[in-house]
Image: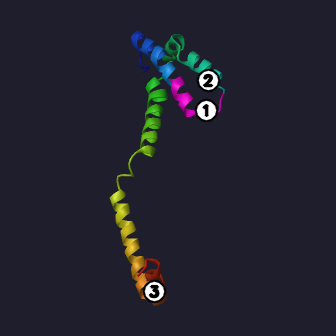
């Protein structure tokens, strides 16, 4: 079943979404010709195109909404805090460090070199 978008929503999409897409493309610094990209956006995000695609059964949420959601989620994740299981990673690294120190203590020459490195 095709999803219907109201004329008001189509107006909002064509008036607000297209300029925002242009801003995103400018920020992304695409290698493609900016004028060609802008023309393509104008055609794809026009009232007529949105209505025709809608009549044909095009699902805007699946085709545009979900990929944009995924893109923004990946963008935020890449710039956000360390992954949630960082505590487990920290514990793993601490355990590996302790094992390395234990191995170091078993080798007297290596232990002496280590002490000289840390100034003791």
Question: Does the rendering let one see residue 57?
Answer: no
95 w.r.t. 63: above or below = below
Disc 3: CA contacts within 10 A as few (<14), some (14-19) or many (>=20): few
Q: In the image, residue 110 lies at what x, y percent?
A: 48, 85
Marked residue nearer the N-terminal end (2 or 1): 1
Helix, strand or loop status at disc 3? helix
Quadrant in which the C terminus appears: bottom left
The nearer-to-camera label among 1 and 3 is: 3
Disc sitting over residue 30 in the figure: 1
Quick one: 117 or 92, which is closer to the camera?
Answer: 117
Label 2 neighbourhood size at 10 Å, few (<14), some (14-19), many (20+)? some
Q: Report the span colored magenta.
A: 21-32
Query: Which colour assignment does the render follow?
Result: rainbow
Helix, strand or loop for the magenta stretch, by majority? helix
User: Real-space Cα distance between discs 1 and 3?
Assistant: 55 Å
Residue 22 in magenta stretch: yes
Front position in the image: 13 or 64: 13
Q: Provide the residue designation for mark 3.
A: 112
Q: Which residue is mark 2?
A: 37
Mark sitting earlier along the chain (3/2): 2
């Amino acid at each position: 079943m095709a999803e219907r978008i109201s004329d008001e929503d189509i107006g909002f999409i064509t008036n607000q979404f297209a300029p925002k897409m242009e801003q995103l493309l400018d920020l992304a610094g695409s290698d493609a010709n900016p004028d060609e990209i802008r023309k393509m956006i104008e055609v794809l995000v026009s009232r007529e195109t949105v209505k025709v695609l809608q009549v044909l059964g095009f699902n805007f949420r699946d085709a545009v909404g979900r990929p944009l959601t995924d893109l923004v989620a990946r963008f935020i994740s890449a710039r956000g805090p360390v992954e949630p299981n960082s505590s487990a990673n920290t514990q793993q690294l601490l355990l590996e460090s302790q094992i390395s120190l234990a191995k170091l203590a078993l080798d007297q020459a290596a232990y002496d070199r280590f002490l000289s490195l840390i100034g003791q």
